[in-house]
Amino acid sequence: MIKKYFVLICIITSAVLIIVATFNYPGGSLFDKNSIGFDWSGNFFSHLFAPKAINGSENTGRIWAIIGMAFQSIGYGTFFINMANKISSKLWAKILKFIGVINIVFIFLIATPLHDIGTISIVLTLLGLFTISIYIIKSKLHFLKVCCVFCLITYYCFFALYGFGYLGLTVIMQKIFSICSLILVVGLEYFTKKEDFLDV
């Protein structure tokens, strides 16, 4: 039972712990150094991992955020490894397994002083989801096709907004693509099977 729902358990645990971290974040945002608490439209999730909050207070939410990222890294890594076992192409199966193994380390690095290196996991996750989406689009799983396309669009919008310097919108889009990818991962994990990709 635990093995079957391992990815779901990791993702739910991660989400709960991250939310707990936001409730324990002292304050300070990109737009108001003296604001109280975590501002969903003014703080990046990465602010939860710093020893000190933007307002200078000790970040009591940090430990919850770090543990939450540990669960997320394991959950996402396991997801890509599981999806690799459903894909018919041996080459892409190996690539997805590689992404899964690497992401277990790199996603967690986001919560450490090696945050910038850890952001490589975003690129790897996007590559993995893009690869899986190609297979989904070629399958008969019509609802998941829409979910894949929508999720990828939110990723691209995030990168575009960040690149053009629209930090206010980037902060909001980070929350949107994070939620979309969590939902998509759960959907792909539990509503696809190897037989769906036999003819792809």
Image: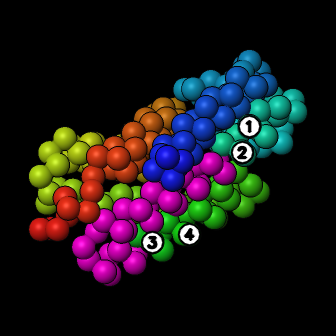
Q: Residue 64 shows which numbered tag?
A: 1
The type of residue carrying mark 2 is Ile
Give coordinates of residue 60: x percent, y percent: 83, 31
Q: Which residue is mark 2?
A: 67
- In the picture, residue 186 is in which quadrant? top left
The type of residue carrying mark 1 is Trp
User: Which of disc 4 and disc 2 is earlier in sequence?
Assistant: 2
Seen as rendered, the residue at the extreme top is 36
User: Which of disc 1 and disc 3 is earlier in sequence?
Assistant: 1
- Of residues 27 and 109, the one nearer the viewer is 109
* Residues at circles 1 and 2 in contact by the CB criterion of under 8 Å: yes
At a point 28% along the width and 69% down the height, the residue shown is 87
Residue range highlighted in magenta:
69-95
**Can residue 159 be seen in this snapshot?**
yes
Q: Which residue is mark 4?
A: 102
At a point 79% along the width and 40% down the height, the residue shown is 63
Can residue 149 be found in the magenta stretch?
no
Q: Residue 97 shows which numbered tag?
A: 3
The type of residue carrying mark 4 is Ile
Give coordinates of residue 108: x percent, y percent: 65, 56
- Of residues 28 and 175, the one nearer the viewer is 175
At a point 29% along the width and 46% down the height, the residue shown is 191
